[in-house]
Amino acid sequence: MTNKTSSINVIASDTQLIAGIQKHKTDLPASISLVGQEVTPDQAVTILQARIATANAVPPAKAAYAKAVAAHTAEMQETDELVRDLRAYLVLTNKKSPDVLADYGLTIKKAAKPSVATKVVAVEKRTQTRTLRGTTGPKAKKTMKAALTGPVVVDAGGTVQAAPALAPHAASSAAPEGTPSK
């Protein structure tokens, strides 16, 4: 017998124990002391048969569980869009009545506020873009946009230190430098 305790090995081992107990029942004592209790050979067979029955019940239960999980997943995928739209509809129609929304278990989502760091980066990017564009025509301005080439650092005093170099992002149809814009 192997050391692996898979359900197949347990069933085979228990079945072999039952066969051995029944074959040599007359050679065994009327009562055997096991784990502090007296067990007859017939009780040992009953215990082993119960172990086999419960081991045999596991694979169908696992299959039923897998089938139920698959059905649940399929149902969720089929109805997800409908439920999402239903929630959006209820929020839209009851957005001025939070008590009604609470009855549905819904709340109005507040718009996310950008962090201070995000605002600082945006201001710095805006400043660099304006510096890069200079005084050009509206079409030329449309093709230019500054990209930060390094990190923007905000110290405790609120001083902004950005990357010194500007890297222009020009559209592929941008006019070469020195060409007048229309």
Image (cartoon, rainbow, N blue to C red):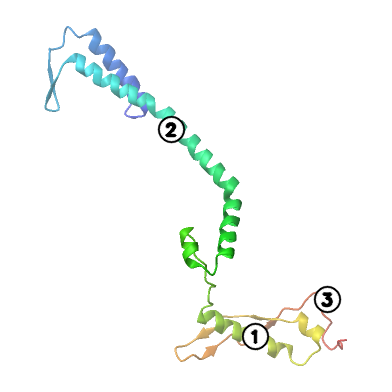
Question: How many neighbours does mark 2 have within 10 angstroms: few (below 14), some (14-19), or many (20 or more)?
Answer: few
For residue 62, the mark is: 2
Q: Considering only vertical position in the picture, is 136 above or below 48?
A: below
Residue 26 coordinates in the image, percent (x, y): 17, 6
For residue 22, the mark is: none
- Whether pointer 2 and pointer 1 mark residues with C-beta atoms closer than 8 Å, the reply is no
Spatial CA distance of label 2 from label 3 is 63 Å
Q: Residue at x 69, y 89 (%)?
A: 130
Residue with the mark numbered 1: 126
Spatial CA distance of label 1 from label 3 is 23 Å
Q: Secondary structure at mark 3?
A: loop
For residue 173, the mark is: 3
Question: How many neighbours does mark 1 have within 10 angstroms: few (below 14), some (14-19), or many (20 or more)?
Answer: some
Q: Residue at x 54, y 70 (%)?
A: 96
Residue type, mark 3 in image? Ser
Residue type, mark 2 in image? Lys
Where does the N terminus fall, quadrant-wise?
top left
Residue type, mark 1 in image? Arg
